[in-house]
Structure formats: structure tokens, C-alpha cells
Image (cartoon, rainbow, N blue to C red):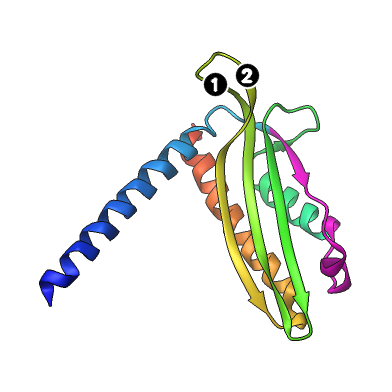
Amino acid sequence: MLRRLLPLILLLRTAAAATAQTESREGASLAGWTEIGLVVEALNSEAAALGLSEQQIRSQTELRLRQDGLTISETAGGRLYVHVGLVAGKLGYSGVVQLQFVQRVTLRNGSRNWGSTWDRGRVMGGPPGDLRDHVSRLLDDLLDIFINDWLAANPRE
């Protein structure tokens, strides 16, 4: 039995180590940013019909970022994108909540372009009545991760 499980254990340990290294590099990409832009992507009509609003998402996100020391600015070079994708049906909804930090990056060929340097997301699903609370909880969880990574990359003196 152990011989069958050993390859799986090794695979899981390797995957965990690779994830930790990726997350470490992503967190380091937040160093030096004290002012960022905020983009809340447009919601589809299904999300609006279930009571979700872009303004709710924007307000919650701005409040959390400001409470922890980040300034929100339309002219900042780095931007935090908030994406809520949703499909709804008679029995409920399924979708994703995603945060991405996007900034100018230099490619290997020397050209500069926009690139995502930090990215986290959560999958969701449930009955129609709890969409707003579900999105709010997932957004809070993702903002906790973003802010913790930002604070680790920008220690307060």
C-alpha cells in the first residue's frame, strides 16, 4: 500500500513546493507599491439580477485596501483587477471571484507590456439567495491574501 502512495505523496510535496515558490515571487512583485489603481470588471446581467453590484464590490475593496495603508489612484501604474464571473440557473449559481495585480513588465526581448504579477481566485457555487454574501466572503478572503502579501513585501518601519 505504501508503495502505491509514495509517488502520490512525492507529487503532492513537489506541487506544494512549486506553489510556495510561485506565491513568494508573486508577493515580491508587490514591493514598492503604495498607490495602486482599482478596476472592477463589469458584471453580467445574471449577477445584477441576483442582487450583486459593481459598486458593492468596489466599495468593499477600496475600504479594505485603504484600511491597510494603500492609496487608490486613477493614475497609479499598478492596478488591482477584481473579476466576478457568474453563471446562474434555476437552482443557483456557479462562478469565480478573482484578484489580479497588473503592472508594466519587461519581456525577454526588451519590450514593455502589461502583465499580471499576482493572481488569486476562488470558485463558488450556491443557491440564488446567498450570492451577495458568498461573493463578499470570498472577496474578503482574497483581499486578506493580497494585503498580507503586500505587507510582507512592504514592511512597516
Q: Can the viewer see residue 155?
A: no
Q: Which residues are magenta?
A: 36-55
Q: Is residue 68 above or below residue 89?
A: above
Q: Residues within 10 Å of mark 1 (few under 14, many from 20)?
A: few
Residue 149: image x %, image y %?
50, 44
Tell which of 116 and 8 is nearer to you: 8
Q: Which amino acid does the dot numbered 2 rest on?
A: Arg
- Residue corresponding to mark 2: 112
Residue 149's label in the rendered image is: none
Q: Which amino acid does the dot numbered 1 rest on?
A: Leu
Q: Residues within 10 Å of mark 2 (few under 14, many from 20)?
A: few
Tell which of 75 and 119 is nearer to you: 119
Residue 86: image x %, image y %?
74, 66
Mark 1: secondary structure: loop
Q: Residue at x 64, y 35 (%)?
A: 102
Do tag 2 and tag 1 residues touch (Cβ < 8 Å)?
A: yes
Tell which of 10 and 81 is nearer to you: 10
Of the 4 image quadrants, the one containing the N terminus is bottom left
**In the displayed structure, does residue 94 sit left or right of residue 118?**
right
- Residue corresponding to mark 1: 107
**In the displayed structure, does residue 2 sit left or right of residue 54?**
left
Q: Can the viewer see residue 130?
A: yes
User: How far is disc 2 from disc 1 in space, using C-alphas?
Assistant: 6 Å
Instruction: Name which quarter of the figure residue 128 lies in.
Output: bottom right
Tell which of 68 and 134 is nearer to you: 134
Residue 30: image x %, image y %?
54, 34
Q: Residue at x 79, y 52 (%)?
A: 58
Magenta stretch: includes residue 92? no
Q: Residue at x 27, y 52 (%)?
A: 14
